[in-house]
Image (tube, rainbow, N blue to C red):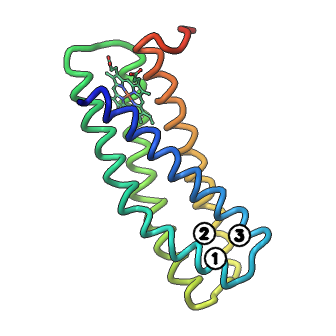
Amino acid sequence: MFRLVHPLAGLLALAIICLFWTATVTVELLGTSAQVAAVKGAIPWGFLILIPALIAIGGSGERLARDRRGRLLSTKQRRMKVIAANGLLVLVPCALWLAASAAQARFDSLFVAVQGLELLAGGLNIALLSLNFRDGLRMTRRWPAK
Ligand code: HEM
């Protein structure tokens, strides 16, 4: 069961963060203020799926790791700590603040700065999740070793 849940939760988390990221960039570049507010208002609801998916990845990953050692595994565990800290300490507060500001049509320079920070933090988590996905496939020999 954990062998199935683990990669599926990984794919789901990656898909959700990529969707948040591309929807944000698209609407900021091409959308109206109302559309920006709609996307910013929808993102916190996505956390109701994203956060359980991240918990499922970590929980199932630790379970699968019980009898394993090695560099790939310890690197994945280190990355997961950064993913979780970045998510809880940067992405969630930024997203909640941006949703509240957009709902009041407050698109000032602070909004732009926080939006930039959120995109950077989101990009970091996309990169780290992708690296963990690749190294998971290396551990099961579905991806060529270095
Ligand atoms: C605490 C963090 C993590 C730990 C301890 C962990 C541990 C593991 C272990 C032990 C395996 C080998 C399973 C087996 O032998 O069948 C594995 C595979 C895998 N992991 Fe992780 N993982 C973690 C995070 C992640 C993340 C964040 C992702 C993706 C976003 C991910 C994606 C995968 C994938 C795709 C596989 C290969 C599954 C397969 O080929 O069947 N892992 N992981």
Quadrant (top left, top right, bottom left, bottom right) of the N terminus: top left
In the depicted structure, whether residue 115 falls above or below residue 70: below
Secondary structure under badge 2? Answer: helix
Whole-percent x and y of residue 33?
70, 83
Secondary structure under badge 3? Answer: helix
Circle 1: residue type: Phe
Residue at which label 1 appears: 111
Quadrant (top left, top right, bottom left, bottom right) of the C terminus: top right
In the depicted structure, whether residue 104 falls above or below residue 40: below
Whether residue 109 sits left or right of residue 104 in the image: it is: right
Furthest-right residue in view?
30
- For the point 58% across and 78% down, the residue is 38
Q: Which mark is residue 27?
A: 3
Query: How far, Cα to Cα, is label 2 from label 1?
Result: 5 Å
In the depicted structure, whether residue 60 falls above or below residue 123: above
The mark lying in front, picked from 3 and 1, is 3
Secondary structure under badge 1? Answer: helix
Query: How far, Cα to Cα, is label 3 from label 1?
Result: 14 Å
Do the residues bearing badges 2 and 3 touch, measured as CB atoms within 8 Å?
no
Q: Which mark is residue 146?
A: none
- For the point 65% across and 64% down, the residue is 24
- For the point 26% across and 34% down, the residue is 60
Residue at which label 2 appears: 114
Whether residue 35 sits left or right of residue 95 in the image: it is: right
